[in-house]
Amino acid sequence: MSDADSRLVSMLESIPYARFLGVRAELAGDEMTAILPFAQHIVGNPMLPAIHGGVLGAFMEMTALAQLSVAAPMTRQPRTIDVSIEYLRSGRPLTTYARASIKKLGRRIANVHVEAWQETRSAPIATLRGLFLVAPSEEGA
Amino acid sequence: MSDNEQSRLIATAMNEGSPQARALGFSTLEIGDATALLKVPYRPEIVGDPETGVIAGGVVTTLLDHASGQAVHAALEAWTSIATLDLRIDYMRPAEPGLDILARAHCYKLTRSVAFVRAVAYDRDPEDPVATAQATFMLDASAGKKPGANLKPSRISRARTGGAEQ
């Protein structure tokens, strides 16, 4: 298991809320895909049914945090400064995937964009742009 | 704030009928006059940073989204389906570990298609917020969609935007 792999696994396992939602992640080289398996307790609108928008936001924020943990060792977990979430399609009762792209990882601030999709990658259901206060450790900066 | 009976019924349905709201233990403390005040109780299961015991930002996101939706319903004359179009959240400071988080949302503008909402999340004092949010909602979001619509297999042609058509 690579350093990035073990950082990712220990990060997701250590976060109670990630376990609460059932978030997992897979790493292929430096490319990470976060996975949110469908479960009844993540539904927001029971009529359609649709995944809660807040859960999708939380999942994408966690994807950004996980991608940052893969990118560099941190002395502590990054703190979210702000997120801007756009909802494009309703989250169907299916597995949701997300990938994050770090646009800039500075000494203090990271800018990360995330896209979440279900069946079709080219038809994302939601996107997130977030700013994070980071503390990369010396050797990782 | 005057509690409006219809808004109260919708709030109860949204807290008890939504599995995620129930899983997080959301309750509505006040609703009426285009405003809603919701609470999420502190629990170790919803912590985001195990080193500090602070509730995950994602829980605050869900609470702000849910409270904002209820504020929209409290602003509408009659029930209509709504969907979040976008949600911007600024995190001012970590919530205090062990404390419940409250969110007060106000729907300050309704148009024919869109509702505009501002919301604040706090633990002790609304003047010292944990997070603030700005959201827009589409009104009559499920126009033509029947209950169970998301259970049908999707066609690529159905992959049109839900949000951009208002």
Image: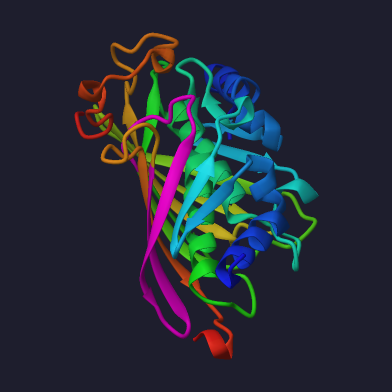
Name the residue nearer the viewer: B117 or A98: A98
Name the residue nearer the viewer: A80 or B157: B157
Residue pictured at 64% horizontal, 49% vertical: A18
In which image quadrant can residue A8 be found? bottom right
Give the x, y percent position of residue B42: 76, 48
Q: For residue A92: magenta?
A: yes
Give the x, y percent position of residue B76: 40, 24
Q: Can residue A53 be seen in the rendering of this structure?
A: yes
Residue that protrudes farthest toward the bottom in the picture: A138
Q: Can residue B34 be seen in the rendering of this structure?
A: no
Residue pictured at 56% horizontal, 69% vertical: A4
Residue pictured at 50% horizontal, 57% vertical: A27
Q: For residue A114: magenta?
A: yes
In the rendered view of the protein, which quadrant contains the N terminus of chain B? top right
In this rendering, is residue B90 above or below A17? below
State the scheme by which the image is colored: rainbow
Give the x, y percent position of residue A61: 50, 55
- B46 sits left or right of A110 in the view: right
Residue pictured at 36% horizontal, 15% vertical: B153
What span is in magenta?
A87-116
Residue that protrudes farthest toward the front in the picture: A1
Name the residue nearer the viewer: A90 or B73: A90
Give the x, y percent position of residue B49: 69, 62
In which image quadrant can residue A139 be found? bottom right
In which image quadrant can residue A126 be found? top left
Name the residue nearer the viewer: A33 or A55: A33
In the rendered view of the protein, which quadrant contains the C terminus of chain B? top left
Q: Please name the predominant secondary structure of the magenta segment in the image.
A: strand
